Amino acid sequence: MASNSKAEWRENILTPLVRKRPERQDKFENSSGVELDALYCPEDIADIHYAQQLGYSGEYPFTRGVQPNMYRGRIWTIRQYAGFGAAEETNQRYHYLLSQGQTGLSVAFDLPTQIGYDSDHPLARGEVGKVGVAIDSLQDMEVLFQGIPLDKVSTSMTINSTASILLAMYLVLGRKQGVEAAKLNGTIQNDVLKEYVARGTYIFPPRPSMRLTTDIFAYCAENIPRWNAISVSGYHMREAGCTAAQEVGFTLADGIAYVQAAIDNGLDVDAFAPRVSFFFDSHVNFFEEVAKFRAARRLWARIMKERFGANEERSWMLRFHTQTAGCSLTAQQPYNNIVRTALEALAAILGGTQSLHTNSFDEAYWTPSEEAVTIAVRTQQLLAYESGVADVVDPVGGSYYVESLTGELEKQASDYIAKIDSLGGAVTAIEQGYQQREIQQASYKYQKMVEEGKQKIVGVNDFVTGESKVTSTLRVKSEVEAKQKERLAKLKRERDNGKVKQTLKRLEEVAQGKENTMPPIIECVEAYATIGEICDVLRNVFGVQREFLFF
Amino acid sequence: MLGEARIRVLVAKPGLDGHDRGAKVVARALRDAGMEVIYTGIRQSPEMIVRTAVQEDVDVVGLSILSGAHLELLPPVIEGLNSEGKGDVLVIAGGIIPDEDIPQLRQIGVKAIFGPGTKTGELVTFIKDEIAARRESR
């Protein structure tokens, strides 16, 4: 007799079997601590109301996707994060990536550029051109985008504390190419809150940083309508060790803080909210990740509509970039990384991402070689054009398991947001170390599980063979630092230093007052003031933030 | 008895690199193993690390670096410790350090380099053995 319900099936069929033949594990759990059932059935999603929780694609609450036909219209943007050495070398890599069918650029800057030091600063020692390209002034940006028409590409810049300056450089560069601001397409990360929590490239204290952020919102809303003024990022918190549910909760809580700050500064929510975008990690637990993206989309739509009273549909949409999980890559048996990345990329696509970076198999170790980055791009093209997964919208929608998990992750993420609200919002919670402690706790727990073999990593704690490591084919030469310093010295000799001084003075006055900081920063950039000079002015006015260290 | 004194460890993040997951996990694991751990936080210059190592009178300095600046930032730490008369401190490193750079770092006095996939237990054992040997030979 066939079972009439899940409960009946469990009692009569499953339990006796498991008693006789125990399962592989005592319990099955995902990163968010959701205990997984053996089988998901209609009973598990009985409380889901289709129109309210899922709806149709392109309609509120966008669980099934932000566009009505998703990838049938256009494939997601293939956007590989790249940048190393001096601007010339990175420019070559961009031309190569575009020639291989990449559809958007993504700039990796070196750490001095991200933290507002010129290449000749003592703290820049050893770091120039290492984790990204070195940019000191507009001059370097001119080289970086040589031969790339800014009205033909969309460019994402991973830049936070110095986002205003890099955006100003991009604008001025566009102007020099004859491309007006309204035609520029791209994204700046501009998410400083997660820098305090996980990534570490903050400069100023949170409150003046929030002002810089909202100044950018206001400027973009008025002048660069197609620019994503922020990419609220969960990626780095996830890489630092948090769970999938925490990634959504902490990221959306940061998003809430930015939206609130902009509203408090007098902006109309629908004027900037459509240009708020997001950035998530795609990790190895496949269905947890798919559910995570869907949950984030539904939750954000509700937050924007119900909490902030946004009226425009576009204000409710959570659009996001995804990168596959760097921390899932292994130095051991590096070719396995190609497979991991393909699975993670598939999860991001089934989750409805708008753009995607697939990690190169050697990326755990260094700046990817051309061969490795080509395989990473091909992985996306295979998924896009061979696998058929892009041909139907939200193909996993309606799966008892995925819908149940989506609901579960949404609930957990909401609880984290409520907790952060109760602490006084994301900024206060960070100052108190709440997110940092949660992340440290989760990452330590994960490490223990790996060491105890409860979390298997192929090639690392199981299926281990002799060491097979890739060797570095791309190393940033130490000459880059010297060359960059020389170029900087020459610039400082040749530019109109009177003009530089004058524009920096103007920036100082604005920073001390309440006006928008973007226009004077643009003037500084046009005069070829350097990132270090501009940041020094702001450091003097705003002060510097020490690490919020809770250990 | 010297051999029973708690091992004091400085876990430090040289340079501008913000990847602190590994450093924090290691710091906690060493603490759980009974060592006294001082964690510097991120963005430490070699000079700052040396100063803290001297002030805290540590037995071990563990340097975590993932930005690729290890060949520039690790030698000044060793030189600084030597010139402060702390050449006997056990210096180890972790993070992303390519194999081909390891001989150079070992030669200047980085005793061991622990790459990705290292178990924290291995690290604990290594430190305990090294310090015990050093204390015995005193």
Image (cartoon, grey):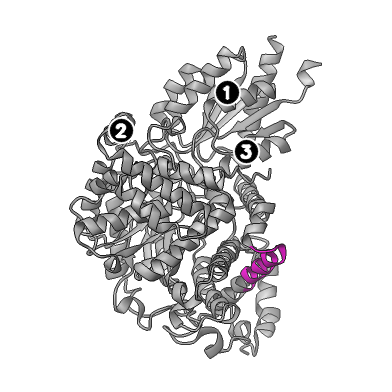
Which numbered disc covers residue A480? Answer: 2
Q: Is residue A154 above or below residue A83?
A: below
Main secondary structure along the magenta-highlighted residues: helix
Residue at 32% across / 52% down in the picture?
A: A169
Q: Is residue B62 magenta?
A: no
Q: Position of residue B12 (x, y in %)?
A: 59, 32
Q: Earlier in the sequence, mark 3 or mark 1?
A: 3
Q: Position of residue A458 (x, y in %)?
A: 49, 49
Q: Do badges 3 and 1 share one subunit?
A: yes
Residue carrying label 1: B91
The answer to whether the residues at label 1 and label 2 have Cβ atoms under 8 Å apart is no
Report the amino acid beneath label 3.
Answer: Val
Residue at 55% across / 54% down in the picture?
A: A208
* Alpha-carbon span between mark 2 and mark 3: 33 Å
Q: Do badges 2 and 3 share one subunit?
A: no
Where, by quadrant of the figure, is residue A389 drawn? bottom left
Which numbered disc covers residue A225? Answer: none
